[in-house]
Image: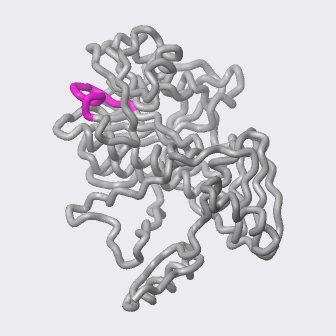
Amino acid sequence: MATAPLTVLVVGATGSIGRLVVAESIARGHTTRALVRDAAKARRQLPAEAQLAVADVTRPKTLPPAVADVDAVVLTLGSDGTAHSSPENADYAGVRDILAALSGQTPRIVLMTAIGVTARGSAYDHLLDWKRRSERLVRASGLPYTVVRPGWFDMNAPDEHRLVFLQGDTRRSGTPSDGVIARERIAQVLVQAVTAPQARGRTFELVAEQGPAPGDMGPLFAALDQDAPGALDAVRDQANMPRRRSRNASAPTSTPSGHPRRPARRDPRRRRTDNHRTGKDHMRATLMSIGVVRPGGTISRVGAPQYGEVPLGFPEFMNNITLTGGVAPARAYIEELLPDVLEGRIEPGRVFDHTVGLDEVPAGYRAMADREALKVLVKP
């Protein structure tokens, strides 16, 4: 499928998929611009032909020069578990700010998310929901787009290279049985989607099965159903996306123009640690612990759990994270932790999750009933 060379921007260019996308784009003759935070590191990792645009998706003011005069943007962003690159900051806010920086331009957008992104009721909801919100942003942008949801990376057998495009996101076990695919194949699909007219307006899951890899992917794209114009969700997706409540129970989650409000940023100064203790065992505390503990470290859950599931899946297993703990009164550990809190080495969680006025008390109770808040402060 011969096409004229384009200027392609790769966001997430130094990631495990992004590096391959850069190489594939260059191999197909495109002028390839890599958005990177660290130019020296990127120069060691990327082909010499790659143009480097130094910017940070968490710093919107750095983005306009990076996105200037591009024909296509391939988004391979993903969270690495740190506060700086949390699911909200990377998967959602990064996509949002790239789209905002493109103001006035109409490039082709190719977004990579994940298979099972519409699944509900698992320990991965917090991650998948932000990916799904990023899909919605792309569909609502009015730009030509393709959304690719790959299966589990590099877990395919040596003879599994035949590409299978699926729709409806029906494989939701959260395990490799949902489908596997080599990173190299993902990069090839993302780059071919940039120029394939049949890929426009399509959302699909991508897996590999036994058989050889295809050459021209045009027929595979053409066999897909197109997303409904103006729809936020993909064709055949379940309408099961929960509404996102704001911090203030009475505040709207969108501006009068309908655009999502800018989410609050987490403090990027947090450091990773070998051991992390969570008190009053709320899910958010455990998720924060997973984000800051080093591989091989230990998370100790102290206090009565406020939830039944434990978000320890394949990534945490591969990092050899140990989970311990039990019910304990605060006096059992406050003497040890208080000096670290006072000296700023530990950032304690909030006592109150929400603050409401007297006329918002019912909303506060709803937040606690919905497990969005453990304690609500009523402030006249």
* Quadrant that contains the N terminus: top left
Residue 128 is left or right of residue 134, and the answer is right
The tally of labels here is 0
Q: Where residue 110 appears, x then y in whole percent?
A: 38, 34
Q: Residue at x 54, y 24 (%)?
A: 185
Residue at 54% over, 37% down: 150
Of residues 323 and 201, the one nearer the viewer is 323
Looking at the image, is 281 positioned above or below residue 346? below
Expressed as whole percent of the image width and height from the top left, the position of residue 53 reads 35, 24
- Residues 295 and 363: in front is 295
Was residue 58 drawn as part of the magenta stretch in this picture? no
Q: Quadrant of residue 329?
A: bottom right
Colouring style: one colour
One can see residue 169 in this view: no
Which sits in the foreground, 12 or 220? 12
Which quarter of the rendering shows the C terminus?
A: bottom left
Q: Where residue 58 sits in the image (x, y, percent)? A: 40, 42
Residue 111 image position (x, y, % from top left): 41, 38
* Residue at x 50%, y 82% (from the top left corner): 377
- In the image, is residue 69 part of the stretch drawn in magenta? yes
In this picture, residue 1 sits left or right of residue 12: left
Q: Residue furthest left?
A: 104
Q: Looking at the image, is 6 positioned above or below residue 193?
A: above
Residue 103 visible somewhere in the drawing: yes
Residue beneath the point at 70% across and 45% down: 273
Magenta stretch in the rendered image: 64-74
Q: Is residue 129 left or right of residue 139?
A: right
